[in-house]
Image: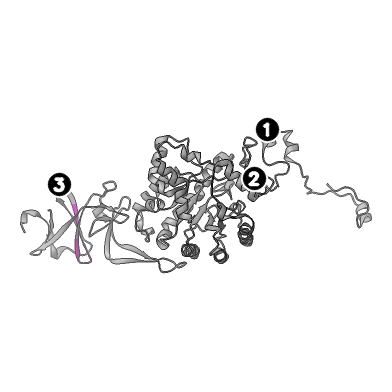
Amino acid sequence: MSTTELIEVKPDAKFEDGDRELVEVNGVEVGVLRVDGEYYAVRNQCLHDCGPVAEGAIGKKLVGEFVEPGKRVEKEYDDDEPIISCPWHGWSYDLESGEQLADDDIVLPTYDVVVDDGVVYVDCQ
Amino acid sequence: MLESDETQPRQETLDEYYVIDGDCHYMESFHDVAEYMEEPWKTKFEGSNFDEKGAKQNLSSFFPFSTGDRQAHGKITREHSSYPDEPETPERIRDGMKSIGVDETLLISHLILSGAGTTADDDRQTAFAKAYVEYMLEEVLDPGDGIHGLAPIPYSDVDASLEILDRIEGEDAYVGACFVTAGATPPLGNRKYDPLYERCEELGLPAVFHTGGAGLDEYVRAGYQEMLETHTLGFLESNMSQIVSLVVQGVPEKFPDLDIVFMESGITYLPGLMARLDEEYLKRPEEAPLLEKKPGEYITDFYYGTQPLEVSAETEYLEKCFDLVGADSLMFASDYPHWDYDRPTTVTDLPFLSEDEKKQILSENAKEVFGL
């Protein structure tokens, strides 16, 4: 892996769950986040109205299950699907895929995050 | 007024006192009073369907009419007009169909349209709906001759509604179940109605949602003055509120084989509603977790009666509405014999529809959905 394709963020040891850092990747701002021990990177520009989505609330996808007619729909948060929501209007995206939760044709650019020799990088390819 | 009756019991006691009655009602007639009115009300009242007492078989006896007369105060006088004093007959239905150019028809109860506004008890609606089902079956419906029925569903009483659905199982004359959208509280996407949709789906009966005049004068707020206001807004509001409820609560996901039909609000409201709901959904999809696609896409999966079709709208705009809703989702509906009825010519005259699309809308979609 060529180091010229990687944008350095900060040392892995200093990245705690819930931390986020903004870096510039190919001329655009990208937010790098650590959520439940996993790294994610998304463009910090909401596809709705260019709000700072990478600075928004982290949550989990709420899923519903129709159990039987007449019963309440069972609703629970899916621990495996972290989401991020733009603080301006609440557009929410799957952190892993970048898909808008209401419309998977709308995809927020995401980036691979690598940890090399104790340092966190965004792969800008 | 009572006439003096010297033979009534205890007359001698009454004679001892001078009595003033603080509350006696004089049963004046609209016609008598109209003579003393200033214009334009004199002409309006004399020509209105309120007639002498406003308490006849016609609509004035049960629909609110403070915002006006459906026949526009005597302007609409055609044959087969709505709410005659004489009740409908099977012969008259056939005459009506012929008069507007219809070969097969789906009948709904016109009295049930006001039932949704009956909130004092649920017995009346249920009793009426059950009797209507039997009456129509026995005396009116004639599927072999193209006269089909939609069974009224008194949805406030789920058990009674299920009994009606059980009753019409296997009865070819009934091709769908009718839910009146006006007045439904809670809205019709609520889980309490799930068993009704489940049963309709099981029986292969489309759920036909029909807006109506119940509560029209005060459909959201009191104080409107003209039917032009309430009839435009109230019909839309009743249908829109139930469409939104059904979609957001996931009824099409719960019952994927249930055909859903909405009647009597034209079609131009649909693209606006789709856009409005999709816009909201993009911001708060977690509130509709059963949805697998955008709300607008469910809305175009539903079917819609075309009446009252907005034929006076700019052609390009109307064409766009047809494109967005889809000719495969539209069915001609007349609303016969009501004052704002449409003839099939409203569809055949549209310049942007192909011959195939006209046939789809005029009969083929209905054949498929209702199994005719």
Q: Are the residues under badges 2 and 1 in a single subunit?
A: yes
* Image: B236 above or below B143: above
Looking at the rendered image, the disc whose residue lies closer to the viewer, 1 or 3, is 1
Q: Element type at marker 3?
A: loop
The percent coordinates of residue B247 (x first, y second) are 42, 56
Residue type at the position of mark 1: Thr
Q: Nearer the viewer, residue A110 or B242?
A: B242
**Disc number for residue B83:** 2
Q: Are the residues under badges 1 and 3 in a single subunit?
A: no
The percent coordinates of residue B333 (x first, y second) are 51, 46
Instruction: Describe residue A104's horizontal placement relative to residue A68 as left or right.
Output: left
The chain containing the residue under callout 1 comes to B
Q: According to the image, label 1 marks what residue?
A: B43
Q: According to the image, label 3 marks what residue?
A: A27
The percent coordinates of residue B177 (x first, y second) are 53, 58
Sequence-first tag of 2 and 1: 1
Q: What span is colored magenta in the figure?
A: A30-39
